[in-house]
Image: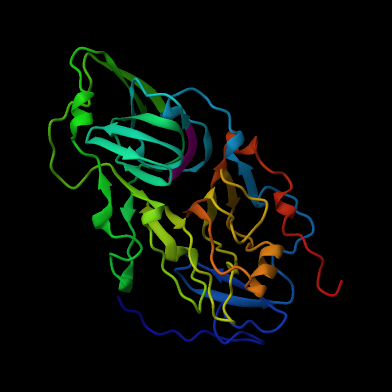
Amino acid sequence: MRKWFSFPLKEGVTSHQAHCDLPEGTFERECGKEGFFGPATHMYHQHAPTGWSEWEGDLRPHAFDTNKVEEVGDNPMAAPLLMSNPNVKVRLWRCNTAMKYLARNGDGDDCLFIHQGSGSLYCDYGHLSFTDGDYIIIPRSTNWRIEPDAPVTMLMIEATHGSYLNSDRGIVGEHAIFDPAMLEHAAIDERFIAQQSNTETWQVLLKSRDSMNRITYPFNPLDAVGWKGNLTVFRLNWRDIRPLMSHRYHLPPSAHTTFVANGFVICTFVPRPIESDPGALKVPFYHNNDDYDEVIFYHRGEFFSRDNIHPGMVTHHPCGFPHGPHPKAFAAGKKHAKKETDEVAVMIDTRMPLDMADAAKQTELDDYVLSWRTPPRNA
């Protein structure tokens, strides 16, 4: 990989390097294109860019609590929709008992993030055990079902009319962040063979073009005796992710990309040491990210850039306005009292704006937009 050097323009008072040694009394804001991959300018403000006192209109930052989302039936293909655009649909699904039918998504690949619970997944490719913190990638039109060992709550992220791909890790190499060799795939094992049946009636609930189809078989369609190829169902746990780090520079979220799909990426924030260099920012920098909506699902731990967030909550920051750490987190970062993060979170960055669905609107925290409110300096 290579690129030409560029020499950015400078006006007024700036830092020597972005995100480090900010001029005294200033707040840095990054205005970027293409989600941290395109051209960018760093502004240095006298006041926090999120220091609004009031907000009118729908382009505000949102937060909602999926713990309060009502359960609607037992079909994962009809799980409550949280948000969507033409490239992605995000749902929340809970399952307490073994599925007696198969699900199949004809509209795109599925990424299942197991927020709570454990169990077994059976699919066309075989059997795969799972636990909390697992990502499970299911190719489009794969038959699958789960048998929970403990009640399961999962975030379902559909790559609508698309597929999940690995991210290009550039000069750090393909084994950085996670080694593809440790991915676990579905296997034709004893448990898979044992669940096969030629006498029972099975139904497949197929979602296609956002409509449901019910297909009945006089046998269990999960009847494969073998397969070969490089397409399958596989899982990755956040505990196996080894994040890129720099003790002298706060890396952008794009450094933590886990999966790439058409029009969006999925990133994973896992525990890591906080930057130790005295001049480096210790919390995410203020930024616009004018081309992407940003969504974060909080899985566990204490998220270090904001307070009053607990596991199961979601924040949604539409593109087009500055956002960044809450005032308390920014102040704590300056003190550098905390030496490492302990949060685990799933971030979804989408190129097209997301529409919030009823399940999100009904559990929204109305005062979240004012959680950055602080008195102006010298007020």
Q: Position of residue 263 (x, y in %)?
A: 42, 52
Give the side of residue 274 with respect to residue 138, left or right. Answer: right
Let me know if residue 91 is in the magenta part.
Answer: yes
Q: Look at the magenta stretch and give its main secondary structure.
A: strand
Q: Position of residue 371 (x, y in %)?
A: 72, 55
Quadrant containing the C terminus is bottom right
The total number of labels drawn is 0
Task: Give the farthest residue toward the right.
Answer: 379
Query: Residue 334 is drawn in which quadrant?
Result: bottom right
Q: Name above or below for residue 362 compared with residue 335.
A: above
Query: Residue 125 is drawn in which quadrant?
Result: top left
Residue at 76% x, 60% y is 373
Q: Name above or below for residue 69 compared with residue 165.
A: above
Viewer-proximal residue among 122 and 322: 122
Viewer-proximal residue among 36 and 253: 253
Query: Residue 228 is drawn in which quadrant?
Result: top left
User: Which range is magenta?
Assistant: 87-93
Let me know if residue 92 is in the magenta part.
Answer: yes
Give the side of residue 74 with respect to residue 123, left or right. Answer: right
Q: Position of residue 372 (x, y in %)?
A: 72, 59
User: Can residue 210 be spotted in the picture?
Assistant: no
Q: Name above or below for residue 218 compared with residue 114.
A: above
Residue at 28% x, 51% y is 183
Q: Position of residue 218 (x, y in %)?
A: 22, 13
Residue at 56% x, 62% y is 290
